[in-house]
Amino acid sequence: MNGCPTPILPAGAFMKQDNPTYDLECLDIAKNFGSVRAVKGVSFDIPSGSFFSILGPSGCGKTTLMRMIAGFEEPSGGDIKIKGKSVLGVPPNRRNVKMVFQHLALFPMMNVYENIAYGLRCAGFGKDHIRRKVHDVLERIALPDVAEREIHQLSGGQKQRIAIARCMVLDPDVLLLDEPLGALDLKLREAMKIELKLLQHQFNTTFIYITHDQSEALVMSDNVAIMNQGEFEQIGTPQELYHRPNTAFVAGFVGDSNRWSGTVKASDGTGGKVETEQGLPMSFSAGAGQTIRDGAKVDIFVRPEFIRTVRTAEAAAIAADGDNRMDGVIDSLLFNGANSRVLVRTGSGELIESDVTLTGDNDLKPGEDVSLVWSSKQAMCFARQESA
Amino acid sequence: MQNKDIKRLTLILLFAPFALWILLLIILPHIGMVVLSLKEKVAPRVYEYSFANYLDFLHEPIYWNTLLRTGSMSLLVTALALLIGFPIAYYIAKIAGPRARGGLFLLCLIPLWVSDLIRSFGWILLLRETGVISNFLLWTGLIGQPVEFLYNDAAVIVGLVYTVILFMIVPLVSTLDGMDNSMIEAGYNLGGNGFTVLRRIIIPYAMPGIVAGCIVTFMLSAGSYLTPILLGGKNSSWFTEQIYNQFITRFNWEGGAAFGMLLLLFTSIVIWLGLKLSGQTLANTVAKS
Amino acid sequence: MLAQKKTSPFLLGYRLYVVAFFIFLAAPLISAGAFAFNDSLFPALPWQGFTLDWFFSDTEPKLGMFHDRRLLQGLYYSFVIAIFVAALSVFVGTTNAFLFVRGEFPGKNFFYIMMVVPLVIPGVILGISILVLASDTANYLEDTIDLELEFLRPGILLVVLGQFSFIATITSLVITARLKKFDETMEEAAFNLGASRARVLRTITLPFLRPAMIAAGIVAFLVSFENFNTTLFLVGSEAPLTITMYDRMAKVGSTPVLNAVSFVLMVGSGLLALLSILIQRDKSAQ
């Protein structure tokens, strides 16, 4: 961000550090590869039994962070505590943190039973105990009859569940999931999102889910951390991230947005007027925790669902709804059922996206003159980052 | 850190067998051969360092003629193997159905599992005066009396092509197999005819395979011993035969070592030239096949 | 595809060419094998009727191969040599695979080329160079400290080493190719499930490599069995089969007993090759 790494800590971070209600605590954890700082002092802690996602673009350091928690990488600084005990220096095969790999890494030379029994055998359990545990976990993932199948005979969704069962049979303190849905096709991915959430409830174990797909993170998680360039930008519930982003990056990364750059003309600190680079005036409210001064360069984000599109002829009647208004021509109509959108080309030539409800009767059509109306409350404004 | 020490130790343990192998069985023996080839016997059990063995080679036309003959015939064998093998490889990789492909490929490999000796023996039985082909031609009436097909250059070339062609086909099939059919289709789609598609798309793509096949083929041909001797008879004049004569028959190890070095140098230069001209490297051709 | 765009006479011609090629491939093998069953003293036409004498007869002049002591001895030596060469080559091939796939060390590319080089050195030269070094060493030791090391003289050990010197390249390439396909997260997953390093190697990595190791072993065995050029210079009194057969051919001339041996070898190699293919095939299960 602005060069000085101020980790964003949720309230719990400063509580007693051996507090057992946290399954995992990371304290100012960092990782350098040579001169590259992959993870720059990240701190967070995760309450027992919650579903926590780390969401960020590829290359943001989320996989490195996860590999440090699993023990495949040694952190360059900071501390990792599991159930209140530091695990620094503990090799991966001694940590009670289990991991579901991106491509699952099921062992192809073993059948389902042997895959699930692998960890139990490593731990030295007796045959009967292993048999009971494996069948028990297969029941819980609702695949009681697949024990003798070979891995290649399973469907994508079944493999997913076996990979989770293989970890859960060891009763881990924390389960790490590294984009395990990435390889599935779209439909299965949607179904697995719900399934994962249900599995997490059933096992009541802390899940840490790494993804670059915001919808996976938003749908499943209790809390989401947004990661960018080795740092956490914001941690919060999905709703908080969506409606009250702390930074321009979060506003742009989570959900769709129309984005303008501009200069503040008049401001009272929490809101005011801006002139965009195209010369359009616009009123705004400052994003959470931001203080906007006169003359500052800012970015303004407006989500498509908060923009109303009305025919210019009818606009006068409802102009009072919003304090921002822009006129333009519908360039194209992106029909997608309930998620339909219009692209409106404004007088200055830019394209603005706006959600519309299409009823099939007297709908907007390309070429029509329209006015776009939105409230300044929905225009989130962030001071421009020089580094960006 | 302890972890690092274990890694170093593992690396050293893994490197040891490799180093012993390459050092004791490849590098040192070759150095020993170079040293030996530079020795000249001036009296019984008395040696001097000199280039005498190499000068012998230059002064005796039979020797360098044999080397040139071995080289040029091996090049011919390589070219023939490529010409004959390429259509076969293309057929296996691109035209045959998926079922037939595996079967044909295996058929190609079958002679690989039989020794040089047996292959040459089979050819002798086919080609000699009392052999199958001569008898067959007599039976058809094309010839009036038995004909000897053995003991000439053509027989040697046929035998060598037969011996080495598998090593041409196998790398060709594996490179052509990796080629996306749509590349060929795109070539036609963009207006190419059969010849331009072959020349502009297929051959450049298959180049690593072609070069790998040619190197191995040339090497095997130039270094072969049994096939030229058995099929070419007394006057096959193959360079490996000269090496054998120096070593075993005349017990002139110094001369034999010099001849060995010459053969090695000669084949290395040809391979090096081939790699330079085709713009390939040893690592991306032979090592891949 | 190329042929589909052409008229069908072209394809027909092409097919005929392919058929002719396979006849060319098969002809010498068939003739080498078939004459083993000809009831004649010479491996030549005309066909005198079917016999198994060249395999099982125990009387001259049609001494069958299974009663020919020198051939059987050659077979035995070939077998012993091939077993040692295969075992040694697979071992070194496996360590080389780990060295070049997993190891990071300076000059790695150079050493990789060095690993491939033995394959492009003519077999004759490998033979004589190892012979020269071994003899030099033996002579030197004998002259200076009066130590006679019999194993450095031509014999089984030198034959094994000579064949190993280039067969190790073949096994290294086969096993390296397999190890490159290994998904290393599989090892991480096993660590993550609590396995020790040794256990991961034993239960995950080596089972993955096993098909390639077996296939490489079979290839090494066959290449060793049929090798002539390198063996020729290193052989002592214990001559393997190819050398025995060559001697027989050079001294006695071709007799149908050589056809019988050829037939047995072809069947044996064929079965081994088939085995290696079946083992490779279970890769498709993954």
Image (spheres, helix red, strand yellow):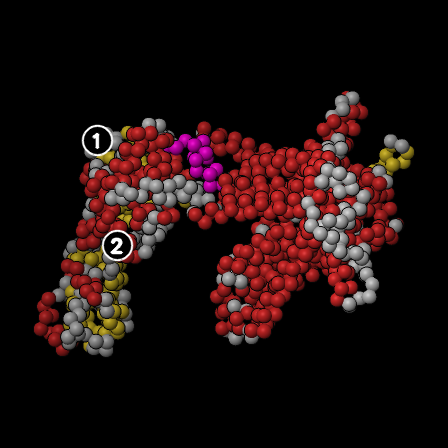
Report which residue position mark 1 lands on.
A20
The amino acid type, in three-letter code, at marker 1 is: Pro
Q: In the image shown, does B82 or C220 lie closer to the viewer? A: C220
Q: Who's the residue at 74% across and 47% down the image?
A: C256
Quarter where residue A73 is shown: top left
Under circle 1, the secondary element is: loop
Identify whether C275 is placed above or below A281.
above
**Is residue C31 visible in this depiction of the protein?**
yes
Count the labels in the image: 2
Q: Up-down: is C234 above or below B62? A: above
Residue C66 placement, left or right of A228: right
Amino acid identity at mark 2:
Glu
Camera-nearest label, 2 or 1: 2
Crowd band around label 1 with a 10 angstrom C-alpha radius: few (<14), some (14–19), many (20+): some
Residue at point 60%, 47% (across, down): C270
Give the magenta-colored segment's residue range.
C194-209
Mostly what secondary structure, the magenta segment? helix
Q: Is residue C206 magenta?
A: yes
Residue A278 appears left or right of B118? left
The location of residue B141, given as percent across then percent down, is 77, 67
Q: State whether discs 2 and 1 lie on one chain.
A: yes
Residue with the most extreme front position? C49
Q: CA distance from mark 2 to mark 1?
A: 34 Å
Q: Residue at x 71, y 37 (%)?
A: C67
Badge 2 marks a residue whose secondary structure is: helix
Q: A106 or A42: which is nearer to us? A: A106
- Seen in the picture, residue A340 relative to C197 is either above or below; the reply is below
Tell me the residue that label 2 is attached to: A190
| Outermost residue to the right | B43
